Image (cartoon, rainbow, N blue to C red):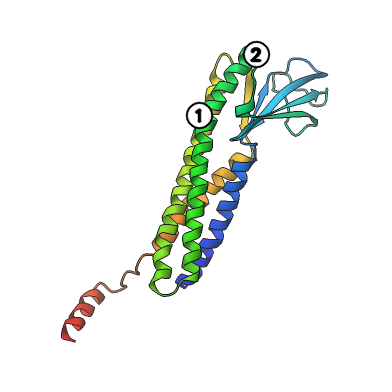
């Protein structure tokens, strides 16, 4: 396979990775939390959140959906939803105060790191555009910083994922929390996909931009001797 073809494939994979990462950043289904449901035919309160806001959904649990000892949900059931951005949230009960403070501390970090990831993606895209429109050595030269920027974007995405995971873990393990069940939702899956595609493809793009190694170990020496003779 030719080098140009490999680069085109890498660019396509990077576009998919950037789309996944952007989707994860702007959506709020990173994790879903559920409290315990003790009785049937009552309304319970489940929650899902992302980097920027927390959404609470009031779900009516009928006999068909009730499972003894399980949490509220599934979140796909119909119900009234109330979403609040973290900086505008006004907590009430002690459990809510703890959950809010915990989530806000971690989410500020995760959101800031995700912004760095988006910034690296923009820088990488600019270098990639310059490489596609350039000529000669300048074309391959710009692939190097592009690959590095995309790899850094994937690394920032991984750090953001880990911060979010620690946030959920701390909330669930605390004695003050009302949540007993949790799972990571499709926004989290998009972020994981974005991390893998951006980091690995960015690194691959960096390797593709490197000078090709000689197939024969004696080629370099022979070329050097030929230059000296001339």
The CA span between labels 2 and 1 is 23 Å
Instruction: Find numbered disc 2 in the image and state the secondary structure of the residue it sits on.
Output: loop
* Count of numbered badges drawn on the protein: 2
Q: In this view, does 18 lie above or below 43?
A: below
Tag nearer the camera, 2 or 1 = 2
Q: Give me the residue at 58% from left, 14% from top.
A: 176
Q: In this view, does 2 lie above or below 190?
A: below
Instruction: Find numbered disc 1 in the image and state the secondary structure of the residue it sits on.
Output: helix
Query: Which quadrant of the structure image shows residue 88?
Result: top right
Position of residue 106 in the picture relative to residue 209 (left or right): right
User: 122 or 110: nearer the eye?
Assistant: 122
Position of residue 9 in the picture relative to residue 75 (left or right): left
Q: Give me the residue at 74% from left, 15% from top.
A: 38
Question: Which residue ends up furthest to the front in the rendered image?
Answer: 88
Query: Which quadrant of the structure image shows residue 208?
Result: bottom left
Query: Which quadrant of the structure image shows residue 213?
Result: bottom left
Q: Which label is found at residue 133?
A: none
Quadrant location of the C terminus?
Answer: bottom left
Q: Give me the residue at 56% from left, 14% from top.
A: 175
Q: Where is residue 191 in the image (x, y as percent from the top left)?
A: 56, 43
Position of residue 74 in the picture relative to residue 120 (left or right): right
Q: Where is residue 29 in the image (x, y as percent from the top left)?
A: 65, 36
Residue under pointer 2: 93
Q: In this view, does 154 lie above or below 78?
A: below
Q: Which label is found at residue 166?
A: 1
């Amino acid at each position: 396979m030719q080098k140009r073809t490999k680069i085109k494939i890498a660019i396509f994979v990077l576009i998919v990775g950037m789309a996944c990462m952007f989707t994860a950043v702007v959506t709020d289904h990173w994790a879903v939390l559920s409290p315990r449901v003790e009785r049937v035919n009552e309304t319970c309160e489940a929650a899902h959140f992302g980097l920027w806001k927390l959404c609470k959904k009031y779900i009516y649990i009928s006999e068909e959906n009730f499972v003894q000892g399980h949490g509220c949900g599934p979140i796909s059931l119909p119900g009234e939803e109330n979403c609040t951005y973290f900086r505008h949230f006004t907590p009430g009960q002690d459990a809510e105060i703890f959950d809010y403070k915990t989530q806000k501390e971690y989410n500020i970090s995760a959101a800031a790191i995700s912004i760095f990831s988006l910034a690296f993606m923009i820088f990488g895209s600019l270098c990639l555009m310059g490489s596609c429109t350039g000529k000669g050595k300048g074309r391959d030269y710009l692939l190097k910083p592009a690959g590095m920027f995309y790899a850094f974007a994937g690394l920032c995405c991984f750090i953001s994922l880990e911060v979010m995971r620690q946030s959920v873990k701390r909330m669930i393990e605390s004695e003050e929390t009302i949540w007993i069940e949790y799972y990571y939702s499709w926004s989290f899956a998009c972020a994981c996909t974005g991390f893998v595609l951006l980091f690995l493809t960015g690194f691959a793009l960096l390797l593709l931009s490197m000078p090709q190694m000689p197939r024969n170990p004696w080629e370099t020496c022979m070329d050097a001797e030929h230059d000296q003779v001339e």
